[in-house]
Image: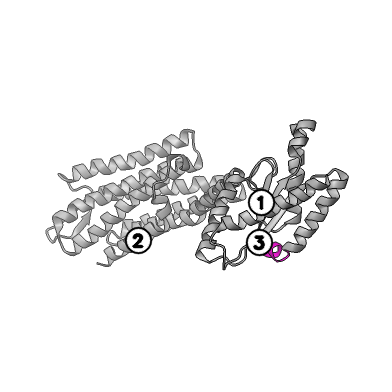
Amino acid sequence: MYYSGFGMLALVIHIIINFRDLKKRPEGEMALTDKRYRKFLFSLIIYYLADICWGLFYAMRIIPLTYFDTALFFASMGLTVYLWMRYIIAFLKVENALSGVLTWAGAGILAFQIITLGINFFLPIVFEFNENNEYVPGKARYIMLAVQVVLFAGTAVVPLFRAGKRSRKDRLHYNAIGLSGIVMTIFIILQTFDPYAPYYAIGCLVATCIIHSFIEVDEKEERDRQLGSVRRLAYKDALTNVKNNRAYDEARAYMDRLIRSGELKEFGIVVFDLNNLKKVNDTLGHDAGDRYIQKAGRLICNTFKHSPVYRIGGDEFIAFLEGEDFRNREELLYHFNRKIEDNLNTGGVVISAGLDILDPAKDQGYDTIFERADSKMYERKKKLKSRE
């Protein structure tokens, strides 16, 4: 029963480490290598299940079930080899004669397995059970394993040879593929000499662990970084490089939930509105208006350096005060307003600002804080207008 016990352990580990790869994802998120690797992983699940059942049936001496499961065992082995070759072709981006060789070699092993298993029902060339119900391997089994040894050794040599011409990261990936091929070669040789030990399953488990650790994790992190970059661009205002209205809507909803749940104790916002943007656009043109908005964004960000700043309208900005900016909010607002008053005299950008903070005992959500800050901003705007 130990034979099945190892198969069960291998299957559990296989599913745990490859759970994300086994999950179906939208078509656009999967590269060719992802699709082929996923199929290979599912073929291994079939193989592990056949391996587990073989140990159970053979231990209980249920020979008819053991016979059919042995046939499934060898067929699933051939399927894993074929799908492994398909994955290697996609990973190495092989498009020359080598691609054809690997494809036909993998398909040839699968076809050989199916044909010989069909013949085996009439003539025991792959395996049989003797009069004592003992499993006896046949010559075709040894031929099939010998061919696999040559094939896996070949798929180990090719990536190891190509690794030297690659970048450091790609070299690691190619070496991992080569190492997994070497592992499979070694364990298939061991399986050849001991048909009652789960060496093939051990080799598959170790090889997939190597691929997962050194290739799949790296590639997922790279894809996550790329998706993160795309996401950052989607949440950034193209004109000012601060966060845009979409990002603000999500942040506002998140803060609202924290306030309503009582988790947030310190939080402040500053609402900004540009004075005279319409006048600049009408008299100097929209290019000058864009520069005016950009100067305003820089001034806000340079003052509230430790807080996220959002552009929520054509001439409206808002900052969520955090950490040091929250603690020094009054001083920062004072210096910001002094700078704006200087700009009134020098013709610089003029921005009205209103600040307010969370009152945990009174505020039931984000909107009440915003309304107070917005009201203070309009009061400031009136004062600045009266001085123009």
Q: Nearer the viewer, residue 266 or 52?
A: 266
Q: Position of residue 345 (x, y in %)?
A: 87, 46
Instruction: Tell me the CA gap for discs 1 and 2.
Output: 50 Å
Label 1, label 3: how far apart the Cα atoms are: 13 Å
Q: Is residue 290 visible?
A: no
In this rendering, position of residue 370 left or right of residue 25: right
State the predominant SS element of the stretch in magenta. Answer: helix
Assess disc 2: are there few (<14), some (14-19) or many (≥20) residues with their C-alpha within 10 Å of its C-alpha. Answer: some
- Asked if residue 269 shows in the view, the reply is yes
Mark 1 residue crowding within 10 angstroms, few (<14) / some (14–19) / many (20+): many
Q: Secondary structure at mark 2?
A: helix
Q: Give the residue at x 80% y 47%.
A: 386
Specify the amino acid type for callout 3.
Answer: Glu
Dot label at residue 318: 1
The stretch in magenta equals 323-328
Q: What's the amino acid at mark 1?
A: Ile
Q: Measured from the top left, where is residue 126 in percent x and y?
A: 23, 49
Note whether 95 is above or below 356 in the view shown.
above
Residue 197: say if magenta: no
Work out which quarter of the rendered image holds the C terminus and state it. Answer: top right
Q: Which mark is residue 12?
A: 2
Q: Which residue is tagged 3?
A: 322
Q: Please state the horizontal and vertical placement of residue 338, each as a whole percent of the image.
A: 82, 55
**Quadrant in which the N terminus is drawn:** bottom left
